[in-house]
Every structure is written in structure tokens, then in C-alpha cells.
Amino acid sequence: MESYLKHLDYSVVQQCMHCGMCLPTCPTYAATLKETSSPRGRIALMRAVADGKLEPNSPLFADEMYFCLGCLACMTACPAGVDYADLIEHARAEVERAGTLATPKRSLIRMLMLRWMFTSNARLKLLGWLLRFYEKSGLQWVVRRSGLLPKKLAELEALTPRIAPKFSEDLIAEREKPEGTVRYRVGMIPGCVQSLTFPDVNRDTVDCLLANGCEVFTPRGYACCGSLHGHNGELELSREMARRNIDLLPPGDFDAIIINAAGCGSHLKHYDRLLADDPRYADRAKEWSRKLKDVSEFLVEIGFRKPSSIQHPVSSIRLAYHEACHLCHGQKVSTQPKEILLAIPGVELVELPEATWCCGSAGIYNITQPDMSKQLLERKMKNIRFSGANLVASANPGCTIQLQAGGRLFGPEVEIVHPVTLLARAYRAG
């Protein structure tokens, strides 16, 4: 299996001690109780392929690598520090190289979405305009009420995100300066899904940075961080997207590079690993990873200004915080968003049971594995209901879309907001 070992040190596969500490943290193992559907079991399959005991085109190997959510809860639990994120990316790349799951339909979808759509800012905008027309023209209303779509397709259509009236580039200038002294100079990554569906979160992020003395540069023409490609076996394309983003936001020009989407941030922080063998980009990738910060992480690090309670619009809110997997497990950022939320007057932070348990979004998992995704979503919504919260904070657009769908499917239909949005509202009121 030379193609697999070419990019992955075999010692990483051997690092797993088979202790089983990961088992109770794995949503797919908890649901199936199958060893092969656990992190330990999947690593055993990877090692079997690496040792030549299992063929790379084994259906069991392929199915289990993509049945994994990639939530990385196992990495938090692992006492040996196994880098499961790197393992699963290389394993999926091997699945794609072997062509085990390849069908004409699947290949066409991957070509259109991964290689064509999510590599171009212009094409992503086109997708946004088409989805906006689908929603505003009444066509979506007709489709949903006609009952003509097959069940699986109808469930998939229900996840269609609402497209914002304006995109991030319409709301944010390329360069914005704070009033008064500039304390920091930062680059802000607008994201792809975030720019189309939640550009207001990007505006709120910039406003919070400005309120804390940051000059903010938001590049034009940004397409995607490459996480969708890396998580779906397209490592070379993921590397190309990383190079493009480093050129757009040269890390040497900034004190920090800011991201507000958990899934993107987890991938962006590992550009150093992704480009370690690239002689032109390796050093810049190391600097990039060192400076890449989630917005809550950065604000707490610089000692963010606490909002005033005077004329504050937020009052008597019972707020639950859903910990996006790739923020708490992938980036180890957990206390910082809660510190920001606790600083907002009028907010009561209530405990959310299983706050770090995956909601089932997991990139495109709710599309590729709808049954398991729906099962996890129902579990998450039950916990939200039990918490008694009337507002839920989430720091990832995929989670937000998933939880909004969960409210429609299972209830309760509570507002889902980014922590930085609540902080921005408090700053504006003050």
C-alpha cells in the first residue's frame, strides 16, 4: 500500500494502544456497538490495509471510513495522542484511489461539487443566486408541498440552507479600520458556506474585532479552505486550496488570521501538516497555522472589551451552548466561547446535556449518511429540549443549519446564533 504510506508515517497507525477509551465517545459505535464502527476498529482496518492483510478496495474498509463522522471526539479521549484526523483523511484518500465506491453518479457529483463548485468564488456565488431564486420564486414552496419527491430526496431537500439577501463581500469592505488606535492587524476568512448563508455572522465578527482595536482585512475572491476536499479523500486538491489561501492572506502581513467557522478552523490550523513536504509553502504554512485563531480564541487571548449592560437588548435569555465538534475536539477551544457568552449581560448560560456530542452535520455527513445523521440530530434536539433553553449558541454554520432543520423536524424551534453575534449585539447596544 505504497500510496498510503507515501504521505503517512506508519508509526502513526501503530500508535493506537487499543485501550478502548475512545469507544464511549464515538457516536457511530454508541449507535451500532460494532467494533469496526469505532475509532479503534477503524484504525485496525487501516493497519490491516497498510500491512497488506486487507485489500485497499475492500468494501468494509471503504464503508467504515465514510461511516465515520470525523467528529474527532476520539482524539479528546485518546491517552496516546493518536492523530485520528490525519489518519482518516489519508484513509479516505486511499478509498478514492482504490475506486471502491466509484459509480458514474458519485463521480459526477464529486467532480461538480469538489473540483468545480468549491474551487471558485464566482461559481459559489452562482450557486447562491440559484438557491436564492429557488427559495424566493416560490418554487421551493411548491416542491415541498407537492409530495412528489421521493422520501430520501425530500429529506435531503429539507436541509437546503436559506441563502442570505446579500453575501459577505456586499456587507464587508476589503479593509476596515477601528476608531482610535489600531492594536492588531488581522486577516478574516469569510468562508464559503458562511458567506452565502450567514454573512451577518461575518459582519458581526468584523464588528467585534473593530470594537477591540483590530484593523481587519477580508480578501476578495475567497472560495474554500479545502476542508471539504481533505475530508473526502481529495488531498491534492486540498493542498492546492491551502496554497491559494496562503497567497490571499500572507501570514507575515498579520498578527492573526481569524476564522469563525469551527469545521473550517480545524482544517485551516493544519496547513502546516498539509504542506509539510512543499518546499515553497512549508515555512509559510507553519506561520499560518501558528497565527490561525478562532474568533473567540483570539478575543479572549487579547482581553476583549466586556459589553456594557446599559440599554442592552438581550435580557432573561436561557442560553445553551452546543460545542461544535471541530472547535472543542479539533481545535481544543471550549472555554473561550463560554467566557464570551458569560460576559453578555442578561444571558443565563444553562447546561446542555451531551454538549460535545455530534449533532450529525459533520460536513456533508447529513447528505451521505442521512439515517445516522438524523438519529444523532434527534438525540441533540432532545437534549436541547431538556435544557429548557430558548436560545442556542453554535460556532459552526454546518451545525447551525443542522440544528435549524432539527427544530423543524423534532422541535423545539429555537433561534440558533453564533456567540460572536450576541457579543456584537451587545456592543451595538452599548
Image (cartoon, rainbow, N blue to C red):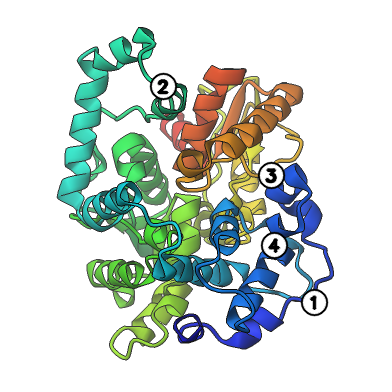
**Which disc is residue 357 wearing?**
3
Camera-nearest residue between 279 and 89: 89
Marks 2 and 1: in contact by CB < 8 Å? Answer: no
Distance between the alpha carbons at the discs numbered 4 and 1: 12 Å
**Residue at left offset 69%, top offset 62%:** 39
Q: Is residue 356 above or below residue 141?
A: below
**Residue at left offset 36%, top offset 43%:** 194
Residue 192 in percent (x, y) is at 31, 48
**Which disc is residue 39 wearing?**
4
Q: Earlier in the sequence, mark 4 or mark 1?
A: 1
Left or right: 398, with 251 as reference point: right
Camera-nearest residue between 26 and 169: 26
Distance between the alpha carbons at the discs numbered 3 and 2: 30 Å
Closer to the eye: label 3 or 2: 2
Distance between the alpha carbons at the discs numbered 4 and 3: 15 Å
Marks 2 and 4: in contact by CB < 8 Å? Answer: no
Residue 265 in percent (x, y) is at 47, 58
Q: Secondary structure at mark 2?
A: loop
Q: Which residue is mark 2?
A: 150
Q: Earlier in the sequence, mark 1 or mark 3?
A: 1
Evaluate whether residue 295 shows in this view: no
Q: Secondary structure at mark 1?
A: loop
Closer to the eye: label 1 or 2: 2
Task: Tell me if mark 3 has few (under 14), some (14-19) or many (20+) residues whose alpha carbon lies within 10 angstroms of its own.
Answer: many
Distance between the alpha carbons at the discs numbered 4 and 2: 34 Å
**Residue at left offset 73%, top offset 34%:** 352
Q: Earlier in the sequence, mark 4 or mark 3?
A: 4
**Which disc is residue 17 wearing?**
1
Closer to the eye: label 4 or 3: 4
